[in-house]
Amino acid sequence: MADRISENLHDKISARLRFYQDIGIDLFYRNRTAIASPSRTSPPVIPSESATPATISVVEEYSETIETVIVADSSVEESAAFEDTLPRTSRKPVLPPAPALQVPAPPKIVLPAPKSGLFDATEKISGDSLLKIRDDIGDCTRCKLHKARNKIVFADGNPKAKLVFVGEGPGRDEDMQGLPFVGRAGKLLTSMIEAMGLQRQDVYICNVVKCRPPENRLPEPDEIKTCSPFLLRQLDVVDPQVIVALGACAAQTLLQTTRGISHFRGQWQEFGGRKLMATYHPAYLLRNPPAKADVWKDLQMVMAELGLKRGAKSTSAGKPA
Ligand code: SF4
């Protein structure tokens, strides 16, 4: 059978078989189980002269299989060697504790100061006083809100307060009593003030318009324009350290913006050289109690600015006489 293959091919097969024997791989092509787990200790000696074309084919197929096994085996060894080079902590990595969930802070929105600030545009009256402002208002008929009002609601609280709350306008209860924030929303505002460690008489409370809009609608632009100069004079006379604008109407009027209050509430704004915090109106909180959390955050910023502590009954919220 040896004479059925060329001498050249015979030499190639013989050389290949010797190569496998030299590297310790047995020729187990007749035993597939052995192929899967080649022995390197007892290489069989296959007489090269017994090789036939069929044998050659099988040998070549087997050779490819063995080479695959060798490559796979060496890659495992390389992998293990690489692992040995890693620091011990790298082999079984200990994951760091998960970082606390970071909630990105909302972008800070500081409204641009209007070219001609409402406060700056208001004519300063020498020797102005709250009494004089009230006298100037008189039995006002300057805008259409006078038609349905019962009482003009000027203000309430400490005329020397460091903190002023500004609402939009009187409601039914306020219109009847002539005092701001005395209805349900007013009671909630009083609770908020007390939560800040203050009493209602420690702060100054007023509105953008002094007369009740019919059906508790929002004041209209012409009404705001007509009445707001009185508010600005009040703020100038009281001269608070901090102004809290309650609701969109007050915030938009003082800051001269049409942006929704949710865009800039909770962030300090500047008004006439004073700090202004816009937050939700107590009437809105009655309809939407979850928003109280936002308002409390805003008020805490105000407390920090004024050096107030929750629950501490303050008797010094007003400026020295
Ligand atoms: Fe006068 Fe103001 Fe009353 Fe209008 S809302 S009538 S401007 S006090």
Image (spheres, rainbow, N blue to C red):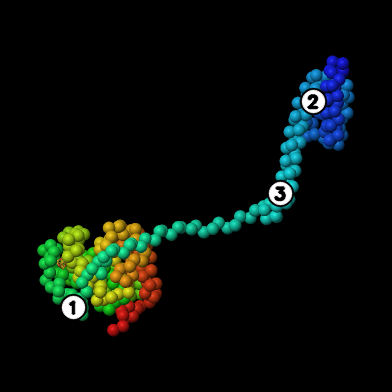
Tag 2–tag 3 contact (CB < 8 Å): no
Which of the two labelled residues, at mark 2 and mark 1, occupies the earlier sequence position?
2
| x, y percent for residue 153 | 18, 70
Q: Secondary structure at mark 2?
A: helix
Q: Residue at x 45, y 57 (%)?
A: 104
Q: Residue at x 77, y 26 (%)?
A: 60
The residue indicated by pointer 2 is: 59
Q: Amino acid at mark 1?
A: Leu
Q: Separation of disc 2 and disc 3 at Cα?
A: 36 Å
Q: Residues within 10 Å of mark 2 (few under 14, many from 20)?
A: some
Name the one closer to the observer, 290 or 165: 165
Which of the two labelled residues, at mark 2 and mark 3, occupies the earlier sequence position?
2
Q: Is residue 149 left or right of residue 292?
A: left
Q: Amino acid at mark 3?
A: Glu
The residue indicated by pointer 3 is: 83
Residue 131's disc is 1
Q: Amino acid at mark 2?
A: Val
Q: Is residue 25 above or below residue 283?
A: above
Residue 30 location, quadrant = top right
Quadrant position of the C terminus in the picture:
bottom left
Q: Residues within 10 Å of mark 3 (few under 14, many from 20)?
A: few
Which of the two labelled residues, at mark 1 and mark 3, occupies the earlier sequence position?
3
Q: Separation of disc 2 and disc 1 at Cα?
A: 115 Å
Q: Is residue 126 above or below residue 226?
A: below
